[in-house]
Amino acid sequence: MRKVSLFIAMSLDGYIAKPNDDLSFLKLVEKENEDYGYAEFVNTIDTFIIGRKTYDYVLKEIGSSHYDNGQRDVYVITRTPRPGVGRTIFYTGSLTELVEQLKSDNGKNIYCDGGAEVINELLKHDLVDEFIISVIPVLLGNGTRLFKDGRPEQTLEFVTAKTYETGLTQLHYRKK
């Protein structure tokens, strides 16, 4: 069965964005020729699930090829129907039904690339199998929390912890 994985960065105090969806704190650990295992991770997946706000931000900052390279399915979770573009589908139905269907299909793993609303909806239904969380050495004090209240308790199994000279620490856990 396919797994749903998170691969996401957060501040030491648990925020994935500053107020107004500001991701500038990620620049603190930018380093030439260092992707913190992202390329290796993306080779294990063939499907993206992403919230519309995160998708729009990446589209503006990086471009659509970050997600849709013609070899992966991209599901943008949105409340507003839009026609698909390439292999990008703007999905307005039940997130849990979509993920349960995708997990039962054949293929590589599924990458949930945020945002917090999508991640927390998956966590409420115990649909995240793997957590790769990069902790950035900064205390933001405010913003969008990675983990919101109101989720069931989940015990995880430790896989690895890696440290980098930028101060970033990457934690890898999987569902027990």
Image (cartoon, rainbow, N blue to C red):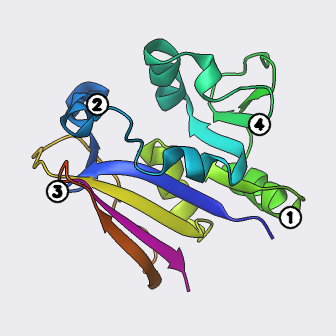
Residue at the spot 42% in from the left edge and 42% down from the top edge: 35
Mark 2–mark 3 distance (CA, rounded to whole Å): 15 Å
What separation in Å lies between label 1 and label 2 (alpha carbons)?
A: 34 Å
Task: Decide: is 16 above or below 62.
Answer: below
Tell me which label, 2 or 3, sits earlier in the chain: 3
Instruction: Give left or right: position of 20 versus 132.
Output: left
Name the residue beneath numbered marker 1. 104
Q: What residue is disc 2 on?
A: 23
Callout 1: 10 Å neighbours few (<14), some, many (20+)? few
Residue 112, percent from left and from top: 58, 49
Q: Position of residue 104 (x, y in %)?
A: 86, 64
Toward the right, the furthest residue is: 106
Quadrant of res 87: top right
Crowd around label 2: few <14 · some 14–19 · many ≥20 (10 Å): some
Judged left or right of residue 33, residue 72 is right
Amino acid type of disc 1? Ser
Residue type at the position of mark 4: Arg
Q: Are marks 2 and 3 in contact (CB under 8 Å)?
A: no
Front one among 89 and 6: 6
The answer to the question of whether label 3 and label 4 lie on touching residues, with beta carbons closer than 8 A, is: no
The N terminus lies in quadrant: bottom right
Q: Residue at x 26, y 25 (%)?
A: 20
Query: Residue 112: in sight, yes or no?
Result: no
> What's drawn in magenta, residue-wise?
168-176
Packing grade of label 4 (10 A; few <14, some 14-19, many >=20) is some
The percent coordinates of residue 38 (x first, y second) are 50, 46
- Nearest to N terminus: mark 1 or mark 4: 4
- State the residue position of label 4: 72
Between the C-alphas of marks 4 and 2, the distance is 25 Å
Please, what secondary structure does the residue beneath circle 4 have? loop
